[in-house]
Every structure is written in structure tokens, then in C-alpha cells.
Image (cartoon, helix red, strand yellow):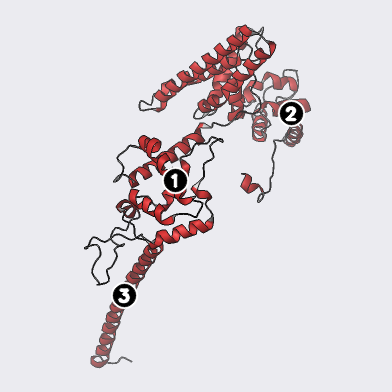
Amino acid sequence: MKSLVGYCLDLRYRRPTKKVIARRAMQIGNIEGMKVEENAAEAMAESCGNDIRQVLNSLQMWSCNKNKTSSNGGSSGTNITYRDLKERQSEINKDEVLRVSMFDACKSIVEGARRLSGSDAKAANASFYKRTDAYFVDYMLMGLMVHQNYLKVCGGQHNAVKVKGDDDGEIEALNEMSKATDAMSDFGMAEDNLRGGDQNWALLPLCSVLAVKVGHHAGGPTGGMLPGYAEFAGWLGKNSSRNKKIRLLQELRRHMNYKVSADAPELRMNYLPIMRKQFEELLFCKDGAMVTEAIELMDEYGLDRDDVFENFDEFLFNAKDLKVKKFGDLDSKTKSAFTRAYNSMAHSSQALVAEQGAEKTGRKKTSGGGDAGMGGGELDVVDDDKVEESDEDDEEDDIEALQKKFLKKGRKSSGGGKAKANGKKKGGKKKK
């Protein structure tokens, strides 16, 4: 989003306050013949989560009870007082879970049971059911969200005890952290069976309970505090990068398979670091880049330009202490010289030519007019522009051939029509 901020207008929308909604609800009630108290309208808006549509729905439901009388005696059933609203609030209010975002639901889970000191079993059960319902706000991502944020709550509990100098409390906090990690591991096993080959969706309630168990141990007996907002699941980005690197590593293995007999992990650990070091010595030479030698090394292992300048940079360690030169940081002059030299030479990589989809188009012609492929000549680098131009020429030739066919048919049909018309004029009689 940072790259788009300079080109966008930031417009922030907020929910209307309960006073604004209450004022409008009173106006609508007066138009419909209902008397709505101000405090009752504000309580209605608050119970609906400041949702205007739900407030209008509640007014409509209330207006349907015309035959009922108010509990305060004598007034019409369509009038809304604060006392009547509290009596029927369970019928018209909006479910609180529907107003909770995914981040707020994750926060309520990982913080555990809060403000329950001295409360009875009924309040504890209500808190437990509330946190299990929060898991179903988005059960597809809630497990990853809990995994991303529960250690922050554990860290807060541990730091609070450590500041006090309580060694026993610190050990207890570490034990609770271990129990939270075990519960998170159990959650991962249950969710794997749920989304794996068995597709056992009956385990979904168990997953919700295990997620709540993670927050119970992370927050401690009195509940914890998540500093700031809940972070989004970072596993999704890491998994995307992992899949990308696996795909690039498979491409490198496919290019080098006729020269190197190794699986993907062995290629990554044993071959790529040594080859990268050799290319660094050739391209980052003090006396200038040794372009010819680098291209010869590439041809020997079946590598192309993208493998060296783009894919090799993906397999680096992110440690700040490692000062590694990236091939993408080469100056444009060196890159241009390398590209010109690479395109001007012939390359014998069968895998490279096959991937570009032109095995038969890259033959070199000998000076005697014979086919270089018959004499064991090497294959040229496929030029994408030339391939596209040849495809366009073929399409134009096909269109011209079709036009000629239609023209021939048209001429024949027109000629036949003229002959018939002439025959009618000659043999037929003129009618007045």
C-alpha cells in the first residue's frame, strides 16, 4: 500500500454514533405514528452495534405488535419506552458475535478468561462459550491467527513476573507457556485430520476448544493482555515464499539434470553455493566482468540468463552479517554487455530450447546451404520476437488464403448468375 498512498485519496468512514441514529429513529417513529423515547432509541442503537439497517428492522418488528399494551400501563404497544425495550431486548438485538472482526475475536481468544475473579460458574461458562463462538468468526484462519499472537500474551505474563523478582512465578509462567504450546500442537494435529485426506469436519468443535485452551494457558488464571492489535497470520506469506522457492529450485534441477544427478535438497545445499561463488568471481571481477567464461559455465550446466541473474538471488540467507553480492545489483552496462554476448552466441542446451517451445526453429545453416543439424551443429538461442513475428506472418498468410478462397467462390457464383441472366434475356420473352 505504501507505493499507492501518493496516488490515492484516503477517505476514512466511521460508524455513526448512537445519538445520531437515535435522533433519526425518533423521526422515523413519529412519521409512522410511534412515540420513541430518546434513551430507548439510544439503547436500541447500542444493542444493534450502531447498525442502521438492524435499527430499522427492530422498529418494524416493534410496530407489528399493535394489539399489545405496554407494561407501564395504558400506552399503545407501538410506543417504545426504555423499560419496554429492556424487557424485549433479547428479541430485537443483533448477535454480538456478528459484530466482532477477526482480529477482535483472536484477541479475545488469546487473552483468555478476563474479569472473572470472584464470579460464579455461570459467568465462567458464559465466557467460555463466548470465546468458542469467537473461533467461528472465521474458522478458516483463526487457528493461524492464534498461532501468530499467543506467544505475545505469554511473554507479557513472563515479563510481569520477572520484574517482581518472583522465581517461582517465573517458572510457573514458563510452564504455562509450555502448556499453551502443547495445546497449539494438538490443535495442529486435529486441524490436519480435519482438512487432510479424511476431511473429518466433526473435529471442528474440538479445534475451537483447543484454540480456547491455548488462550487459557497463555493468559493465565486471571487473563492476559495482548499488546497492541492482533497481527495477521504471517504463515501465509512464508508459505507463499516457500512454494516459490521450491518451484524455482525444480526449474534449476530440470535445467541441470543432464549434467548433475542430485535431488532438490542436495542441489540446494551442495551445488548452488559453489556455483554461485564461481559466478561471483567471474561477474564481479575487479578487471571487469568475464562474460565469455560465465556464458561457457552456464552452457556447461544448461543454465539460462534468468537462472543466474534472478533465480540464484532467491537462495540466499537473510542474515545481515553476510555481505553477499546479488547478481541483480550489477550495473546496467555489465548487464547489457552480457546480454549482447549471450544473444550473439549459440547454446547447446536442449532443455532450454525445449522449454522455450521451438526445437525445430533454431537450426544453424552452414555456408554451403546444408542443414547444420545434420552435421551435428549447435542450436541457436530462440528469439521470442522472431517467433512472435513468424506466428503473425502465418496468421496473415492464413487470412489471405481464406480471402482468396471466398473471392474465388464469389466470382464463380457471380459469373454463374450473369450467365443465367444472359440466358434468360436471350431465350426468354419480354413481358410488358
- The x, y position of residue 222, in whole percent, is 64, 12
Instruction: Identify residue for label 3.
Output: 406
Quarter placement of the N terminus: top right
In the image, which is nearer the foreground, mark 1 or mark 2?
Answer: 1
Q: Which secondary structure, mark 3?
A: helix
**Most foreground residue, 38 or 208:** 208
* Horizontal arrangement in the rendering, residue 116 relative to residue 17 (left or right): left
> What is the CA distance from the residue labelled 3 to the residue labelled 1?
51 Å
* Horizontal arrangement in the rendering, residue 77 relative to residue 121 (left or right): right
Q: Residue at x 51, y 36 (%)?
A: 237
Of the residues under marks 1 and 2, which one precedes in the sequence?
2
* Horizontal arrangement in the rendering, residue 173 relative to residue 283 (left or right): right
Instruction: Identify residue for label 2.
Output: 41
Image quadrant in which you'd find residue 148: top right
Of the residues under marks 3 and 2, which one precedes in the sequence?
2
Q: Which residue is drawn at 66% across and 49% down?
A: 8
Q: Which secondary structure, mark 2?
A: helix
- The x, y position of residue 316, in whole percent, is 48, 39
Instruction: Identify residue for label 1.
Output: 311
> What is the CA distance from the residue labelled 1 to the residue labelled 2?
63 Å
